[in-house]
Image (cartoon, helix red, strand yellow):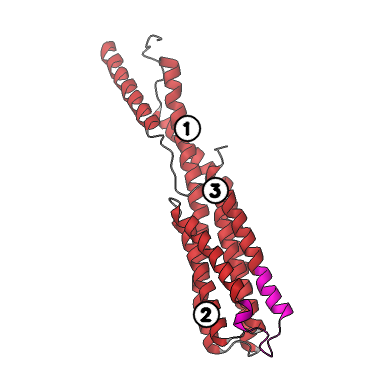
Amino acid sequence: MTNLQTNDPIFDINEVLAQMLGTVKDTVTDNWEEVKSVANEFLNRRKERLELLAELTLTGDLPIEKLKSRLEDEKLVFEAELHAIAIISKAIAQKAANAALDVLYNAIKKIFEIKL
Amino acid sequence: MKTMLLQSRFKIQSLLILLALSLSFISCKVQLVAPYDDGMVQQIETTAKEIDRFYLIMLEVTAEEENGRAYAIFQEQYINFEVELNSLLTKNKVKPVNEHSARICEITLQLWRKYKAEHKEQDYLSDGEIKLNRKTFDDLFFAMLSAEKGKQIANNPPE
């Protein structure tokens, strides 16, 4: 065990927190494109479905009562899409949180290596 | 004064050791989503492809007229796909922190049963309805796959 020196940097909590925050920010930024591209794809697909619904209604292939039923189904499809986005967002949050915890572990580990 | 400072540092060190030990004991990793499952992705892709084929064949090969699209012709396939969707739902439900994926499966199964019941009741499906059903399931499976593949982000180690 090395001797303790009064001027040794033991654990700079501010620096560790800043590093943790930086890691969270980087992880979220790096993966944000994934959420955006999936959300855009959902929007495009929604547009195509609504266009098809409008076309079939205008040509008389889809009676009004069936249109109403299909519009109710749209709510469920939208809910499914929101759940998918929630999973991707949570996965990013999980990765960011674990990366930040790794920063904390490494900072603590470093102290052991120096002091013990 | 110097002794007090040393004592205080010793206390901080002890606390850090305690914290580190606690963290290592509980292996403190945040888990917000279920782990990525390659088998699940394969099953979703296969089911999505087969349901797409089911509706395309119905649209292209069978005719609206003369009861060419009677429910009985497709009954067995409806049952097979419902079994497949049920299996996906069960697999999703038993996984921890997986309620979002389970709900997507529930919605897919709910609409599958609804459209099956409509076909059974009418004993035919128009071209327009087939196109709508095909598109709806294509989009639901896309949501399911996006969700499952999104879980890979959490599994990737921090850069």
Asked if the stretch drawn in magenta spans residue A17, the answer is no
Amino acid type for the residue under numbered disc 3: Tyr
Nearest the viewer among B109 and B7 is B109
Give the percent coordinates (x, y) of residue A115: 41, 15
Q: Are the numbered discs 2 and 3 placed on the same chain, yes or no?
A: yes
Question: What is the crowding at mark 3: few (fewer than 14 residues within 10 Å), some, or many (at least 20)?
Answer: some
Specify the farthest residue to the right.
B61
Give the percent coordinates (x, y) of residue B50: 65, 66
**Residues in magenta, as a range:** B52-74
Amino acid type for the residue under numbered disc 1: Val
The mark closer to the camera, 2 or 3, is 2
The label number, if any, that marks residue B21 in the structure image: none
Report the residue at 55% width, 54% height from top.
B148
Nearest the viewer among B1 and B112 is B112
If the image is split into quadrants, where does the N terminus of chain B sit?
Answer: top left
Q: Please report contact status of discs 2 and 3: CB closer than 8 Å, yes or no.
A: no
**In the rendered view, does A7 fall on the left or right side of B101?**
left
Q: Which residue is mark 3?
A: B36
Q: Which residue is mark 2?
A: B117
Q: Are the numbered discs 1 and 3 placed on the same chain, yes or no?
A: no
Q: Secondary structure at mark 2?
A: helix
Q: Secondary structure at mark 1?
A: helix
Asked if the stretch drawn in magenta spans residue B67, the answer is yes
The mark closer to the camera, 1 or 3, is 3
Q: Please report contact status of discs 1 and 3: CB closer than 8 Å, yes or no.
A: no
